[in-house]
Image (cartoon, rainbow, N blue to C red):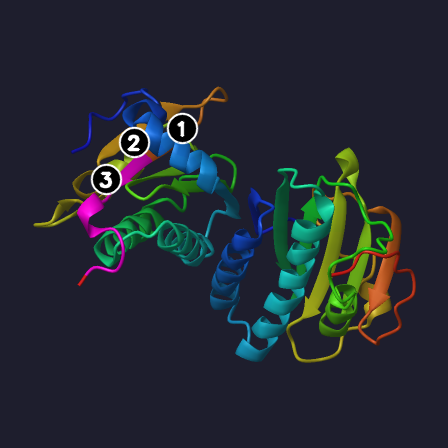
Amino acid sequence: MSEALGDTQTAQTAVSDTVRGEWEAAGTVSLRVADGPLVGPLLRRMVSIVLARADWPLDGLDDALLVCDALSAHAPGRAQAGWLALSVRAGEREAELRVGELSCEGAADLVRDATLPVVGNVLEGIATKVSVEIEPDGGSQLVLVLGTDPSEVGISS
Amino acid sequence: MTPDMELALAARAENIAIVRHVLGGLGEAYEVPEEKLSDIRLAVTEACANVVVHAYPDGQAGQMEVVAAMEEETLTVLVRDWGCGISPRPDSPGLGLGLSLIAALAESVQLGQGEEERTEVQMTFALSGATTDASALAGANTLAGASTPTGTHTLTGTNSHTGTNGQSA
């Protein structure tokens, strides 16, 4: 479950060296996109193919796309300068998704708004870690670590 | 022109699939006709394949970027790398059809060196269905942050491959 917002611990410290090694091997895919209607389609596609290539199970992919939907719904309008910086890197068990170039309070507001009645907070419910990093220019960055059950790696039934 | 998206990733063959998939999102958002989107994907795939095969020889690691911008029914896509540049390569493993294919699919193509010694292939695609005047587009659709390539060579969509200088796929 997620830790408190405002925790500036970087997501890298939350994962093992093995997982980090997998990430380095897989490489990070970064996307800067104009704040607006492009965010949703591009984010979903970028995340889905990167996770699929890392052999994530369908359940894990489905959860990740729910996160993407929540981000797409609430991130637009919170960019610091008209752009959102999205990046994803994935291993077989964990993936890190970053949403950067948000306004000062943008990342925290984004998490706060991703709450559905009955369901609760989508980001905190799905991600194994949610943290906010303050960038040197005063903006903020949301860091989500997503995990999947190793026993489900591959196509789940 | 301000880019709408900038995709940065390692110049590896497997990452070309990511570029193609993300471009699909661009087509979805801009409601690009499927046939046109296929052309765009193919042309950009060829440009990315050139980067993967030629830009970083001997297994060097390197980055490639795909930048896209839409303006007035024209989609401009720029593929850039920081590799060894475009030069004749007699031992090219490809068939040498890449740039010809790109030129056939795009309304205009510009090749050149940008800032920071990056190699850039800039393609424009008219989405309105009407054939766009390639000469009018050439040089007019430079993406922000991508300076007009110096020593630019322009290919047109009419199979007149003037100014090519060797990179192939």
Q: Which residue is mark 2?
A: A108
Indicate the quadrant where residue A123 lies: top left
State the residue in front, A10 or A24: A24
**Segment tinted magenta in the rendering:** A144-156
The residue at the far left in this view is A118
Which is nearer the N-term, disc 3 or disc 2?
2
Mark 3 vs mark 2, foreground winner is 3
Q: Residues within 10 Å of mark 2 (few under 14, many from 20)?
A: many
Q: Residue at the spot x=63%, y=68% of the render?
A: B42
Q: For the residue marked with disc 2, what is the amino acid?
A: Ala
Residue A127 is labelled as 3
Which is nearer the N-term, disc 1 or disc 2?
2
Q: Which residue is mark 1?
A: A140
Give the percent coordinates (x, y) of residue B142.
75, 51
- Give me the C-alpha separation between circle 1 and circle 2: 8 Å
Q: Is residue B71 visible?
A: no
